[in-house]
Image (cartoon, rainbow, N blue to C red):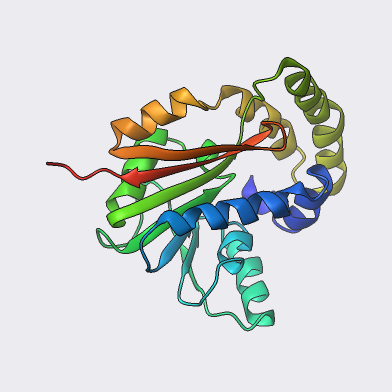
Amino acid sequence: MFAGVARRYDLLNRLLSLRRDVAWRRVLVAAAAAAPPGRVLDCATGTGDVVLAMAGDGHVGADFCLDMLALARRKSISRGRRVAWVAADALALPFRDGAFAAVTVAFGIRNFADLPRGLAELRRVLGPGGVVAILEFQRPPHPAVRLFSRLWGRLVVTPLGRALSDDGAAYAYLPASVEDFPDGRRLAAVLAEQGLEVIQSRQVSWGIAAVTVARRREVV
């Protein structure tokens, strides 16, 4: 599915969010600053927008979609940035324990085949005091915004995705997956079960999306 949307992924992100996705990613990058100094892993990196928005070089972008990684690599070369692009499954990351100060995930955690297992992997690769910063769509808490979001998904996201991408089914899947994803307190509970304590949660664009930051909890 992800290979089918890679070619026009960035274009559709900008169109379907009215370019708000750029600002949301900036909020995510700023939130990741709660971590100690060190390397950052951007998991489910897609075309690399988050890791390329971070200061400094030497960070890692990981994704299992080779087509997405190829686009990310091209972007980093054109911008003169040094990023390690790694083909990896979020449920079995090929990194040692405690390898990173922070892990970011933008619009990817909703697609984890096994959410608890994926979160456990993110915690495993975090060093002491490390944080996971998550940007994800959610069901907006306000009824009017929630109605607008559903109509936008049905009347704009799905038709435009079908018209412009190589895999229109992916954009029919998007609104449905947002409805099914645990957000707010439920997400905090799942994070806590995997040893990650929420220290910050911020809604963006009237609650259409949210940035959640959780710190690795040390086992006593």
Q: In this view, does 142 lie to the left or right of 219?
A: right
> Compared with residue 107, is residue 158 higher up or lower down, i.e. above or below?
above
**Residue 111 location in percent, x, y?**
54, 39
Residue 175 appears in the rendering: yes
Q: Which residue is drawn at 56% across and 57% down?
A: 29
**Residue 117 location in percent, x, y?**
34, 38
Residue 145, quarter of picture = top right
Q: Residue 23 versus residue 15: which sits nearer the camera?
A: 23
Q: Residue 99 versus residue 161: which sits nearer the camera?
A: 99
Quadrant occupied by the C terminus: top left
Residue 207, quarter of picture = top right
Quadrant occupied by the N terminus: top right
> Compared with residue 11, is residue 143 higher up or lower down, i.e. above or below?
above
Outermost residue to the left: 220
Q: Which residue is drawn at 67% across and 80% down?
A: 79
Q: Which residue is drawn at 51% across and 45% down?
A: 134
Q: Is residue 162 left or right of residue 136?
A: right
**Residue 70 location in percent, x, y?**
62, 68
Q: Residue 77 versus residue 35: which sits nearer the camera?
A: 35
Residue 44 appears in the rendering: no
Outermost residue to the bottom: 80
**Residue 162 location in percent, x, y?**
82, 39
Badge count: 0
